[in-house]
Amino acid sequence: MPGAFTGRSKGDAVKDWYKAMAFYQIWIRSFYDGNNDGIGDLYGVYEKLEYIKSLGVDGIWFSPLYPSPNADYGYDISDYKNIHSDYGDLDIFKKVLDRAHELGLKVIMDLVINHTSDEHPWFIKSRQSRNNPYSDYYIWRDAKHGKLPNNWDSLLEGKAWEYCPERGQYYLHLFAKKQPDLNMDNPAVREEVKSIMRFWLDMGVDGFREDVINFISKADGLPNGNPFIPVANGMPYYKDGPHIHEYLGEFRQVAEEYDCFLLGEGPMTTTRSALSYLTGRHKTLDLMFHFEHMMADCFMTEYIRRPFSLVKLKKAFSKWQYELEGRAWNTLYLENHDHPRIISRYGDDKRFHRESGTMLAACYLFQQGTPFIYQGQEIGMTNIRLSSIEQYADVSSKNNYYRFHTKDPVTKRLERIYASSRDSARTPMQWDRSAHAGFSKVKPWFYVNPNYRKINVKSEEADEYSILNFYRKCLAYRKRSKVVLWGTYKEYCRTDNYIYMYERSYRGKKILVVCSFADHNIRWRLPRAFAHSRGKLVLCNYPVHTPHTLAPYEARVYEIRNVKDKANNRL
């Protein structure tokens, strides 16, 4: 069990207080508009801090707040040491930070260092010539035999190279064209990263979520990739690159000057790869976001659709629980700014909205790890359906629409976008039934989901059985249960196509989590290990339950008691 947090002080080693926490992610542009210009901002966050605290979370993760041209909505940064004018300034950020700390909420920032915006001063100077102090801040190459420097694809927008007439060279961009990759092999670039970290840590932030951090070291020579792997062509040469642990080790040294923690995002990472970052004498990260459990209804990317498979989802959940147990700490999440809404994917957003939304909460919040909840997830926000690709703002959605399945009818292509677009996670937060969902008093920057009159914070506050109040119950139970916080994990019914069942065990005490992914009543029975057990039902997403039948998308949490304790009901 980790030691208690004792306050920030330089010289302290990185602590593990994050293990007992739950975080709330804010994608600020769509959270709450505090100055009524149609865009979410820090003034709005300040007004809603008490609401965030009321959920039972212990910290906030801010997606990028920095100045940005918004080619990829904040992940193309033009100034790492300031706040985007749409969201406020450093003064209001400090006010939010201080108030969050007063409420007992820690604050972590996004650290996006694989790439910058092409409007960042470093890039503006770098592209001017081949022999200035910034010329080697980015990855530049000459044409090769009259063609691109290599055959890599961008993950967001076409090929991975863009020609710059000023330099007469191509620059690498693994993401959008306006997101040139930094050259992390240049020591000066790494010193810039350390300076950025210290700037925010000295202000008082409590850690960083490091964006696509396993991509920052590229293979020597940048060799050609496999052309038969679309979009991911080249990834073996920039994922987990040759100097990745060396460079992250330098950044870790900065973190160890403060009482903070480091969370990495690792696209396409495996448990084996993640453990190389999370364990060992030269551990570089405290937590790692992986994507494996987000692939239960798709292949490699949400755009390539597959029927939902509960067995595939459970396999991913259990793999990470078993293989990290006792060695590293898991991150738990079902939604963030990069994925469509989970009820529209793994649940039923039409007939069983409340039931599937609450069940999905239970299925992941009681695993071992640090949970993350994305804004709107706690009220069951769903995917938005738009009528044309021009209405979407997300660069990857547009790229997928125009790049793949182009011979399919427009209706079919739009259906794929509906199911996969990141924009569904970026619609304005639904606060109440008033105009614009209470997000703003003026027309918001993006479309509000029409279901806001039914799905909103105010309506769910008043409903004891709402998704919102079920999240609160789950988080409150997590906080008071040592079994949930520290217990081991064991899955049952591994091949069952409808039930996800797992046990948590700690110092002789157990809980059993039972979740139905069926849209109809199903009979269920306990594994033999519980044949003579008795249990107390401590959480259920239905007001009334039938002992041996699970209702559609029903979730139950039992505390397992000694069979001699007759005060408890038999399971």
Image (cartoon, rainbow, N blue to C red):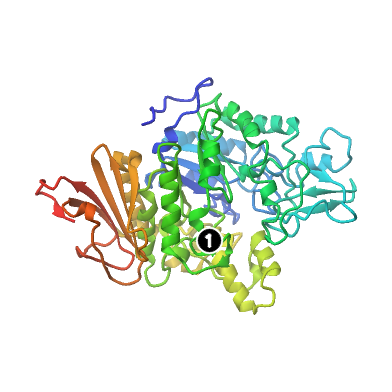
Secondary structure type for disc 1: loop
Comparing 518 with 318, the one in front is 318
Q: Residue at x 53, y 67 (%)?
A: 384
Q: Residue at x 35, y 65 (%)?
A: 498
Q: Which residue is mark 1?
A: 340
Query: Residue 402: horizontal and vertical position, in percent?
Result: 70, 69
Q: Could you tell me if residue 96 is visible in this image?
A: no
Q: Which kind of residue does numbered mark 1 sit on?
A: Pro
Q: Using residue 151 as the reference point, say whether residue 398 is left or right of it.
A: left
Where is residue 109, by image quadrant? top right
**Which of the image's four quarters has the C terminus?**
bottom left
Q: Relative to 541, say whether 488 is above or below.
A: above
Q: Relative to 332, say whether 520 is above or below.
A: below
Q: Using residue 477 as the reference point, say whether residue 546 is left or right of it.
A: left
Q: Relative to 144, say whether 92 is above or below.
A: above
Query: Residue 142: horizontal and vertical position, in percent?
Result: 87, 47
Q: Relative to 534, say whether 419 is above or below.
A: below
Query: Residue 420: horizontal and vertical position, in percent?
Result: 56, 64
Q: Using residue 430 as the reference point, say whether residue 210 is left or right of it.
A: right
Q: Could you tell me if residue 556 is visible in this image?
A: yes
Q: Residue at x 68, y 46 (%)?
A: 238
Query: Residue 45: horizontal and vertical position, in percent?
Result: 51, 46
Q: Residue at x 23, y 48 (%)?
A: 559
**Which of the image's four quarters has the N terminus?**
top left
Q: Using residue 371 as the reference point, say whether residue 118 is left or right of it.
A: right
Query: How many marks on residues?
Result: 1
